[in-house]
Amino acid sequence: MTSPSLLPARLSGTASRWVRDQLAGPDREARAVHVGADAVYLDLGGSCLGVLSTHATAVPCGIRTLLPRLTPPVSPGDTLVVGSGRITWGRAEVRVGRVVDYAVPHLDAATARWARRRLAPPVLDELPAEALELLRAGDPAAVPALLGLGSGLTPVGDDVLAAWLAAMAAAGHDGRHPVAETVQRLAPTRTTLLSATLLDCATRGDVLPEYAALVAALCRRDRRPAHERLTAVGHTSGTGMLLGLTLALDEIALSTARRSA
């Protein structure tokens, strides 16, 4: 395990364009809100930025390094500096070495109708069935019933919402959808900082690579789309995202039909 004294003076990793843009500009302070062996998350003016080990989930708001483990010389509550293209990390600097695409592939109504017959929604007993049915119909009343529901840095209710929002973005629906508007209004005070940031990313169509890979398989009309990589993410996060995707397929197919009627 790399010790703080052996931490490279200059770290770099892969990240989304959004992360690269967050690191640009003048220096400003960011507070460490979570410090672990695989991820350090910072609060930068109400948005969450992460520095990740190679074993961490590749979230679109993080810089994923090649370090097998992080042993950061910081603690929760410590202040770091972000700006000029880097995060000051103790005596080291973390930069974006390569920008990668976290966007979910385009999802059209025909693919949504096809996928609805092949993806069975997983069962998550901790989520209220009534709220899931509301989300299936694109009803914003689902949001307060799901937002922040569950434990952890990304509650499973948020994972469902994030997957639904990303699928809608992939289908060409912008953030003015009533569900997206309600999430954007409530998330800053109703869930964790990381989860609120990931919900914002999902509204733009930026998602976990495992989710994007599943949508890409559906777009290829893969008759047995592999979803095991997605459901293996976290304790319930991947399963929640699979559920959110299946619920969005109905709304994509129906809303497209409504617009063409």
Image (tube, rainbow, N blue to C red):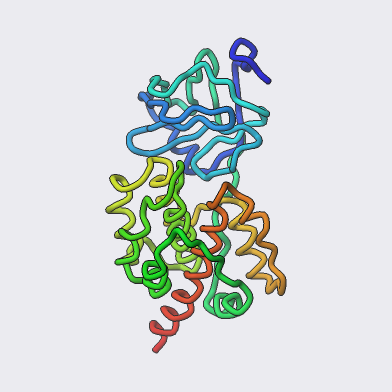
Number of marks present in the image shown? 0
Q: Is residue 158 above or below residue 99?
A: below
Look at 27% across and 53% down and name the residue there: 185
Residue situated furthest bottom in the rendering: 261
Look at 45% across and 41% down and name the residue there: 153
Residue situated furthest top in the rendering: 5
Please identify the quarter of the rendering in which residue 114 is found: bottom right
Q: Is residue 259 above or below residue 81?
A: below
Q: Quadrant of the C terminus?
A: bottom left
Question: Is residue 43 toward the left or the right of residue 95 in the image?
Answer: left
Q: Position of residue 66 (x, y in %)?
A: 67, 31
Look at 44% across and 45% down and name the residue there: 151
Q: Position of residue 154 (x, y in %)?
A: 46, 46
Q: Position of residue 123 (x, y in %)?
A: 53, 65
Q: Quadrant of the N terminus?
A: top right
In this rendered view, identify the residue nearer to me: 90 or 243: 243
Question: Is residue 255 toward the left or the right of residue 5 in the image?
Answer: left
In this rendered view, identify the residue nearer to me: 158 or 41: 158
Q: Position of residue 159 (x, y in %)?
A: 47, 54
Look at 56% across and 80% down and name the residue there: 113
